[in-house]
């Protein structure tokens, strides 16, 4: 991939350059006029475009051509690529539409182009995209109506129109962008390639992606994992539709929506996910700042008490931390602030605060080791000094290493003071709440990153499953579902603790097994055709004697045959009745259309449906990763710490269970879904009470 | 209250008018210069202020004085009020600070003023406030630096500085305000008075309040309940601190945070609560529109696919409804839209859509009976026609009765097209997501209102509790806690179903009672000093015989005496063991510092702590209101519909339980808190298993 020829070409050809105002070919060429390199319009029907000598073909250009921007009808594109290839063009941006999004013929056109791209070694952006912008060298190889301001962030957009809207908004909100790229249908260059490039690019401090769907999830994850260690990746993910997913058979599968899996994947590699367009600009402001906070403690200095209260509320609601000012800072402020100051954080310097009072407050907070960043809220009041205060805030932001954010309120400020703030690269937010949200987003990114770095690449679990045996069981399964008892055997092979379960074919066999296992026992019908055994009268609990087992066996057979006549029954399983469970959890695996295998952990039983308390990880999961996944549930703290007379759970055993499950699904691609439901916790130990493996 | 003299005076005196630039007295007088009525500066030390003849005292003014704005040192204010009273001034705005917020002397000053205000019948705003603005008659009786644009919404702010920030933001975002008032410390005029006034004011379509704490909660609630039937009330509530609350003894008390109670109170009267400053402006835009949607169905028409997807995501996340376009609309659009249009809602008219295409799409959606409102998203693209499209959107908004919102993207649009939109009173939002949020907020307000109107004012419950007996029990309680068995007796008096519970003093008595009630039974120690009986070994469950009862009685006594030596024990209660519970709920009552008695309903057991699934109501609750409160929990749907083998709960019985509890706490003000924990559900019926009443 020659991404440098895309963002830093020395010469660009515009194939399809036009004189027709309002056309894409017109806009493309006009937008390139500010570029300092050579620009060649190409159009076989014109001698000149917008006053510049025009070539009939890229082959006719005398000079070197690094990149071509192509805006010709789709069916002409393959021929143009041939010409570019012959001419030695390194990169092409195909803005034309009319490819796979229009149907089979478009798809064939794309395949044709793909072969040619491979043949010539061309790096191709698009097709069906808005183009590429680099504000550093004033390259606007796009048909965006506008050029963004300079900044230190790369923006990657999977939607051209939304991309141009992001540029418009960035101008409106006064935030800068270094590079912008609309990726179109990613025939060649995809998210992963771009992350790789921007990760190495020194002028880029952070990357923001608008994503609708991922093409190569594993590649993206691999690159992202390495990239986030150097700079933040922020993703706005849209299109929360599960239409593309196959109907899930398992409980796990129906619990793991595509949106949940994206969220899990992003978290697992340390990507910061945002929820709305406003967050794009909040993050742009923070990333352009170039300074990230070392810890979560935010101090707020304000001349409007109410704004301070709302900001502090926002900190609390977003899960942030209001810095606790040290006694020294409080004492210092007491000696310089007006008597009625707030005596704590938020630091209310009162409505009539001068620039000097603001300076003393901000400086004291910045020097406090409990403070990791300061937000200055300025409301214009009768006695206030907006410009003088802005100058001072700017100087303080240069003086201190901690990030200093501001929210300068009111349109007048916009014109004068915010110009001053911008000169000093202070990030200014439209409202204090948005500043708070941006600060906390960055804190979360940093925390997540730190946790990721803490995850050791542990050795493989010490297990030696009998893989042949499992393969046989899988082969033997008449249909797609492996019975409960066999499923448990397979889990046990991977060292997952299961309750002893024996399949009995006759009442007498069941009674023998029950007396061996020890009473009370549970009897459960085993049939690959039954999803909810208990709904068909197929389960009897608390059986205390051999006679009761014999009677129960017959009752189950009768009831099931009555309710589901003609169903195939493997037998009835006998298992020890586990009484006094502390928790019923669910653990399982499912298949995501974009990311493949996933592992899910959560609360089980009715709570699963009411509270949807679950978390997802992408295998393979080592123990620390498994723990991180589990930590994301609300039940986790109770498992870990115990509750009333329920003692703390053996977390190592729980982590191992999840780790091993992830290895099982990785080792056997034939497995499509697994439900362990419930994974019971008794006296702190996990044990599988019921399980089902579903094959592809 | 003479609010008309506050907002529509014919003459205003400024007491403390000043020539000193930057002073409050200067700003106040300067701001009033645009007012059309008579303005009289008053200052004993000046002959003229800002070129106007100045009076030494309000008594010296020849003409009529409706209102006085007072900006003199706090200690002079009582004397000034006397003068105003003598002069027949009807309303005073005291902007001066230095009253109760500064301590006891300030408090005494306030009390003095209060007496004078009552004596003269003066309507007083403040003290310690920013003042009052009415854009309709150009009255700026405040020291806000700016005057907002005209609008149809009233803004009430409990913070002066935040109030002036709201004015600045409103100008920046181009949204109008009809009246603005900073209430200060509400010595006289409070939220309730203002609601009453704005409710009757024809020029006001909606009311937005920034609230830190309420003064007279009952008054506010009564007025608000009537007002929301005429126009929406929106509250931004800040200051989520529970510092003012007494430590709660009961579980209920510790579960019901002050913030939760405000939320419940707002919901109960149909007030729309918002969470952040941005929402103030989103709501201002919608309220100024003057048209509210009849139903939830939103159609989105966009020329940027990505913006459409994000908007649809926002609808889903905020609990809104994307309108399902009728077949007729789809067919109509199919015949006029470009082939690649989205074939559904969001209606993607594609990047090159002309004004005409936009018009056809919007008009078709507006005519669709499934659509209750349309959001137009416009992204500037090469071929698009911003001004022409804006004109067309404006005309369509006049033509149709349904609300039409827009999000016109980009700063260029801001200047030209949004001017056109504003001319036609189309609400334009900075991002489509904010438009979606505002639309959904209004939908929720309307839904809530409709539900409130459905609540019949039912007759009192048919119960005849023995109030004397309850009074005796309350009187007899040696300390603040009434024992479990007595608490249950009191609940039973109100017709609340309780499990039979007998207090036994000796092992033999317990055994006799157990055999009468029927085995298995539970034994529980009864001591007013024990909060968690089971933690002290004070509970034994599943006791199957008289011998076991005798043994258990002694064991409990031993264990409790060992763990809590010297504790006072009333005896041991015997109750029927209830097996196979479907749900464990919690119901109770607590005392809120602002709103007084509250009733709480929620999930019990460990889930209460993990999932915090609860809802609060303010008594008295009739059955429909009780149901509304319960509907706000996540468990509600499962209770109502049943789950697997748990059958639907008798909702009438549950509603009655809550209704009766609310009457109990209303009838006996001596009761501070009640815990019913658990309120068990067995075979669909609620029954109190354990209860505790705590007195004041």
Image (spheres, coloured by chain):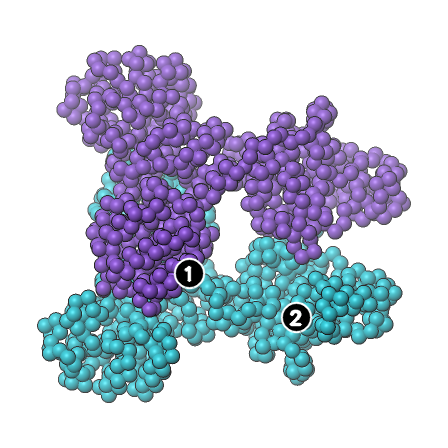
Chain colours: A purple, B cyan
Q: Residues within 10 Å of mark 2 (few under 14, many from 20)?
A: many
Q: Quadrant of the C terminus of chain A?
A: top right
| Left or right: B558 as drawn, with respect to A669 | right
Per the image, the residue denoted by label 2 is B692
| Lateral position of residue A76 relative to residue B471, left or right | left
Residue at 79% over, 73% down: B504
Q: Position of residue A139 (x, y in %)?
A: 25, 29
- Vertical order, A244 against B311 (above or below): above
Instruction: Between label 2 and label 1, give the one nearer the viewer.
Output: 1
Picture layout, residue B215 above or below residue A357: below
The answer to whether mark 2 and mark 1 are in CB contact below 8 A is no
Q: Helix, strand, or loop for circle 2?
A: strand
Rounded to the nearest angstrom, the CA distance separating label 2 from label 1 is 43 Å
Question: Residue A182's x, y, as percent?
Answer: 34, 31
Q: Residue at x 28, y 80 (%)?
A: B75
Q: Locate residue A653, reporting x and y percent.
A: 67, 40
- Residue B235 pos. (x, y %): 40, 63
The residue labelled by disc 1 is A327
Describe the element under mark 1 as helix, strand or loop. helix
Is B249 left, or right, of B685 in this rendering? left
**Vertically, is A299 above or below B559?**
above
Label 1 neighbour load within 10 Å: few <14, some 14-19, many 20+:
few
Could you say which is closer to the camera, residue B447 or residue A220?
A220
**The numbered mark 1 sits on a residue in which chain?**
A
Query: Residue B303: in sight, yes or no?
Result: no
Residue A339 visible (yes or no):
yes
Which quadrant is home to the N terminus of chain A? Answer: top left
């Amino acid at each position: 991939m020659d991404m440098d020829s895309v963002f830093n070409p020395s010469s660009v050809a515009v194939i399809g350059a036009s004189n027709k105002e309002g056309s894409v070919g017109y806009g493309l060429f006009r937008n390139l006029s500010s570029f300092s390199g050579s620009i060649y319009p190409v159009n076989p029907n014109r001698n000149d475009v917008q006053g510049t000598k025009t070539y009939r073909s890229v082959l006719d250009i005398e000079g070197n051509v690094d990149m071509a921007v192509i805006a010709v009808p789709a069916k002409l594109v393959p021929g143009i690529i041939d010409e570019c290839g012959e001419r030695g063009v390194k990169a092409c941006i195909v803005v034309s539409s009319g490819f796979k999004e229009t149907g089979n013929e478009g798809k064939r056109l794309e395949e044709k182009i793909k072969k040619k791209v491979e043949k010539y070694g061309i790096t191709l952006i698009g097709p069906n995209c808005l183009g590429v912008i680099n504000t550093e060298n004033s390259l606007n190889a796009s048909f965006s109506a506008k050029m963004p301001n300079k900044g230190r962030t790369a923006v990657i957009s999977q939607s051209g129109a939304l991309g141009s809207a992001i540029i418009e908004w960035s101008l409106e909100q006064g935030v800068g962008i270094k590079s912008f790229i609309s990726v179109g249908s990613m025939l060649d260059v995809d998210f992963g390639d771009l992350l790789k490039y921007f990760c190495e690019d020194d002028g880029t401090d952070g990357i923001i992606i608008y994503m609708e769907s991922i093409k190569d999830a594993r590649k993206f994850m691999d690159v992202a994992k390495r990239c986030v260690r150097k700079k933040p990746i922020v993703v706005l993910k849209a299109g929360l539709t599960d239409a593309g997913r196959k109907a899930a058979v398992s409980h796990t599968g129906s619990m793991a929506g595509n949106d949940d899996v994206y969220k899990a994947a992003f978290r697992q590699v340390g990507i910061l996910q945002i929820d709305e367009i406003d967050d794009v600009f909040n993050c742009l402001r923070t990333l352009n700042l170039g300074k990230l906070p070392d810890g979560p403690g935010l101090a707020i200095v304000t001349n409007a008490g109410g704004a301070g209260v709302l900001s502090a509320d926002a900190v609390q609601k977003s899960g942030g931390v209001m810095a606790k000012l040290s006694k020294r800072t409080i004492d210092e402020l007491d000696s310089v602030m007006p008597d009625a100051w707030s005596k704590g954080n938020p630091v209310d310097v009162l409505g009539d605060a001068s620039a000097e009072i603001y300076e003393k407050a901000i400086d004291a907070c910045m020097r406090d080791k409990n403070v990791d960043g300061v937000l200055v809220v300025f409301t214009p009041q009768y006695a206030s000094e907006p410009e003088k205060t802005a100058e001072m805030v700017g100087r303080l932001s240069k003086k201190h290493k901690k990030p200093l954010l501001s929210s300068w309120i009111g349109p007048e400020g916009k014109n004068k003071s915010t110009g001053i703030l911008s000169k000093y690269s202070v990030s200014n937010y439209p409202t204090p709440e948005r500043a708070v949200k941006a600060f906390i987003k960055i804190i979360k990114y940093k925390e997540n990153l730190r946790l990721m770095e803490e995850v050791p690449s542990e050795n493989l679990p010490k297990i030696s499953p009998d893989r042949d045996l499992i393969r046989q069981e899988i082969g033997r399964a008449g249909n797609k579902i492996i019975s409960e008892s066999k499923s448990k055997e397979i889990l046990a092979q991977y060292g997952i603790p299961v309750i002893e379960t024996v399949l009995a074919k006759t009442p007498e066999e069941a009674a023998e097994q029950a007396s061996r296992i020890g009473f009370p026992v549970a009897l459960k019908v085993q049939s690959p055709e039954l999803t909810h055994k208990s709904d068909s009268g197929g389960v009897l609990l608390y059986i205390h004697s051999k006679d009761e087992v014999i009677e129960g066996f017959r009752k189950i057979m009768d009831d099931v045959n009555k309710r589901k006549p003609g169903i195939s029954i493997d037998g009835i399983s006998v298992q020890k009745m586990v009484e006094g469970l502390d928790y019923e959890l669910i653990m399982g695996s499912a298949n995501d259309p974009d990311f493949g295998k996933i592992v899910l952990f959560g609360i089980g039983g009715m709570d699963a449906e009411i509270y949807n308390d679950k978390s997802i990880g992408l295998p393979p999961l080592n123990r620390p990763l498994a723990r991180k996944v589990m930590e994301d549930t609300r039940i986790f703290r109770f498992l870990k710490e115990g509750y009333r007379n329920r003692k703390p759970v053996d977390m190592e055993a729980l982590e191992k269970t999840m780790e091993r499950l992830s290895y099982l699904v990785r080792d056997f691609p034939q497995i499509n879904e697994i439900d362990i439901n419930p994974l019971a916790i008794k006296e702190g130990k996990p044990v599988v009470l019921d399980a089902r493996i579903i094959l592809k």
